[in-house]
Image: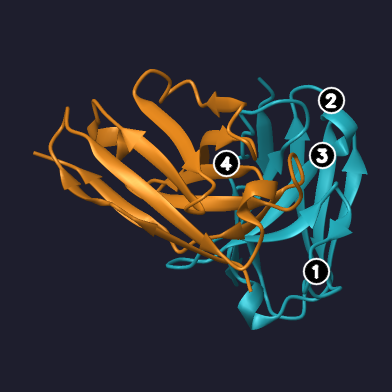
Amino acid sequence: EVQLEESGGGLVQPGGSLRLSCSAVGFRFSDYGMYWVRHAPGKGLEFVSAISSNGGSIYYADFVRGRFTISRDNSKKTVYLETSNLRTDDTAVYYCVKDRIRWSGGFESWGQGTLVTVSS
Amino acid sequence: EIVLTQSPGTLSLSPGERATLSCRASQSVSRDFLAWYQHKAGQAPRLLIYGASRRATGVPDRFSGSGSGTDFTLTISRLEPEDFAVYYCQQYGDSPPYPFGQGTKVEIK
């Protein structure tokens, strides 16, 4: 059974940083693209970032480019989202997501999310 | 970047009724790589449909997807109590970012 577990969320002041982690079990992690998606209070789902199976291709939404960095360690079956210069509108639940196939198959499996609250 | 517009914003229906949700893209979705997700409060989203019309593993057959190019539809043939939720479409063709629509809330009438 595929399981994704996010960690690293919490309360941070504007301008601060957090490192989100997502550990994976139940599938061959190194074979799949991974994503981060967020859900802000009262808003819809937002694509945040993507990383290919070997980490060679990386993408960001415009609103996080230059502030967030995605990476992965296939030996640890973990994907990361390094966030910096956080703003109040970055407050959201951040979900880690596995692709249905190696790449571009749809967002098949989701973690339960980790809450990031940006507030002074 | 493709913009997805969902309609209606809210759909008020009774259990047993048919739900029809629309998703329109600002340009043609590559290879009809269009997905639908169900999201309930406090839970992780769930993939329902991929490739515009293919049900994901374990999804009941009352859920169906159709459409191609720029116009797509999610149909729930007979609403069950557990189907009341927010539904999002998403395109995942070409390269990321993969935007979502703004969502349609299906609520109990």
Estimate the spatial distance between the alpha carbons at disc 2 and disc 4, rounded to whole Å. Answer: 18 Å
- Pointer 4 indicates a residue of which chain? B
Q: How far apart are marks 4 and 3 (CA)?
A: 18 Å
Residue at the spot of label 2? B28
User: Which residue shows up at 74% across the image and 41% down it?
Assistant: B23
Q: Mark 2 lies on which chain?
A: B
Q: Earlier in the sequence, mark 3 or mark 1?
A: 1
| Residue at mark 4 shares a chain with residue at mark 1 | yes
Asked if the residues shown at circle 2 and circle 4 are in contact, with their CB atoms under 8 angstroms apart, the answer is no
Q: Name the residue under label 1.
A: B18
Pointers 3 and 1 within a single chain? yes
Which mark is first along the chain, 1 or 4? 1
Mark number for residue B33? 3
Q: Which-is-in-front pick, marks 4 and 3? A: 3
Residue labelled with disc 4: B102
Report, in whole angstroms, how far the alpha carbon at label 4 lies from the one at label 1.
21 Å
**Type of residue at label 1?**
Arg
Quarter of image, res B61: bottom right
Residue B8 in sight from this viewpoint: no
Decide which of tag 2 and tag 4 comes sooner along the chain.
2
Labels 2 and 3: the sequence-earlier one: 2
Cα distance between the residues tagged 3 and 1: 25 Å
